[in-house]
Image: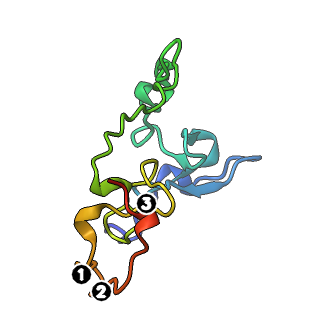
Amino acid sequence: MGTNNPQSEADSLILGDWNAICFRCGSKFKASAMQKNWQGYYTCRRCWEPRQPQDFATGIKEITTPPWTQPPPADSFVVFCGPNDRTAIPGYAIPGCVRPGFIDAAWIGNFTPLGEIYPYIPSALVER
C-alpha cells in the first residue's frame, strides 16, 4: 500500500536549514540549495541564470561638438534709393533713404497710398 503523500527531499529535517520556495518555478527546496540570482531573488539551481553580459557593456563617449566654431558674418545690405524712395509719403518711404520734407514733383496733386490728397504743397518743398 502506497501513500498519496509525496514528500520531497526538502521535507526532511536538516538542522540549521529551512524550506524555501524557488522564485521562478515555485518548487520547494532547502534554503542551502538555493542561489541568489542577479535580481536579488533566490532560485533553485535549475532556474538560476547569470546576468546578461550586455548589461555591463558601456558605449564609447561620442564628441558631438566640432573642435571650433565661429559666428556668421554680419549682414550687409546695400540700399539703392530711387526718387520715390526718398519721399516722406507713408508706404513709399524706405528706411535709410527718406529725406525729411522731401516730396517728388511727380507726387504733387496725386493720391497717397492711404487715399489722402495733398491739397497744397509749398513750392519750397518740391525739388526740381
Q: Secondary structure at mark 1?
A: loop
Q: Answer with mark 3 or mark 2, whichever residue precedes in sequence.
A: 3
Residue type of the residue flagged with mark 1: Phe
Q: Is residue 15 left or right of residue 12?
A: right
Contact, CB < 8 Å: mark 2 with mark 1? Answer: yes
Q: Name which residue lies at 45% across and 39% down.
A: 48
Q: Tell me where residue 73 appears, x and y as whole percent.
A: 46, 24
Q: Tag 2: residue type? A: Ile
Disc 2 crowd, CA 10 A, few/some/many (<14, 14-19, 20+): few
Q: Residue 102 has which mark? A: 3
Give the camera-side residue of 38 and 5.
Answer: 38
Tell which of 28 and 7 is nearer to you.
Answer: 28
Q: Is disc 3 in contact with disc 2, using a CB cutoff of under 8 Å? A: no
Residue 112 versus residue 126 in the image, above or below: below
Q: For the residue marked with disc 3, what is the amino acid? A: Phe
* Residue under pointer 2: 117
Sequence order check: which comes first, mark 1 or mark 3?
A: 3
Q: Nearer the viewer, residue 85 or 62?
A: 85
Question: Quick one: which residue is furthest to the right in this view?
Answer: 16
Mark 3 and mark 2: Cα distance apart in space: 16 Å
| Helix, strand or loop status at disc 2 | loop
Between 97 and 26, which is closer to the camera in this rendering?
Answer: 97
Residue 87 x %, y % = 37, 60
**Does residue 54 sit above or below 8 in this rendering?**
above
Name the N-terminal-most of marks 2 and 1: 1
Residue linked to disc 1: 111
Q: Residue at x 30, y 86 (%)?
A: 117
User: Disc 2 and disc 1: Cα gap in Å?
Assistant: 5 Å
Q: Work out which quarter of the rendered image holds the N terminus and state it.
A: bottom left
